[in-house]
């Protein structure tokens, strides 16, 4: 499974998402992160899976930290 990193919120509230070596986009909600992971081949991922230890490395706050 590729390493997934969600970076701290930017000024506009979005968070950069990296899957493996590539940045895949800017997420503004947990649903955006799920869609990026599904596009990367992790089709069975659901929003509640994102808080599971080891699936996503959350930097600057967990899955509830969006915006200012």
Image (cartoon, rainbow, N blue to C red):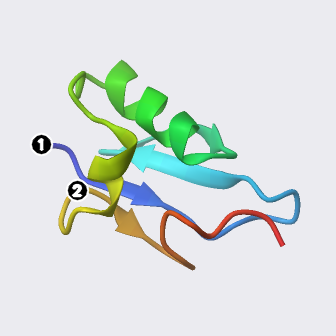
Q: Which residue is mark 1?
A: 1
Q: Residue at image x 22%, y 56%?
A: 55
Q: Quadrant of residue 57?
A: bottom left
Instruction: Name the residue that disc number 2 marks.
Output: 55
Residue at the spot x=48%, y=72% of the render? 62
Q: Residue at x 20, y 44 (%)?
A: 2
- The quarter of the rendered structure image containing the C terminus is bottom right
Q: Which mark is residue 11?
A: none
Could you say where residue 43 lies in the image, as x and y percent from the top left? Answer: 24, 21
Residue 24 visible from this viewpoint = no
Measured as percent of width and height from the top left, residue 67 is found at 79, 64
Against 14, is 52 above or below? below
Label 1, residues with CA under 10 Å away: few <14, some 14-19, many ≥20 = few
Q: Nearer the viewer, mark 1 or mark 2?
A: 2
Between residue 17 and residue 30, name the one nearer to us. Answer: 30
Closer to the camera, 45 or 22? 45
Q: Can the viewer see residue 49 in this picture?
A: yes
Percent coordinates x, y for residue 27 in the rendering: 63, 44
Q: In the rendered view, would you say 36 is above or below 2?
A: above
Q: CA distance from mark 1 to mark 2?
A: 9 Å
Disc nearer the start of the sequence (1/2): 1
Give the residue furthest to the front. Answer: 48
């Amino acid at each position: 499974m590729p390493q997934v990193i969600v970076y701290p919120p930017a000024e506009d509230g979005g968070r950069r998402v990296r899957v493996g070596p590539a940045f895949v986009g800017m997420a503004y909600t947990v649903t955006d992160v799920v869609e990026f992971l599904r596009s990367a081949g992790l089709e069975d991922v659901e929003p509640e899976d994102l808080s599971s230890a080891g699936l996503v490395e959350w930097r600057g706050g967990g899955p509830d930290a969006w915006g200012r």
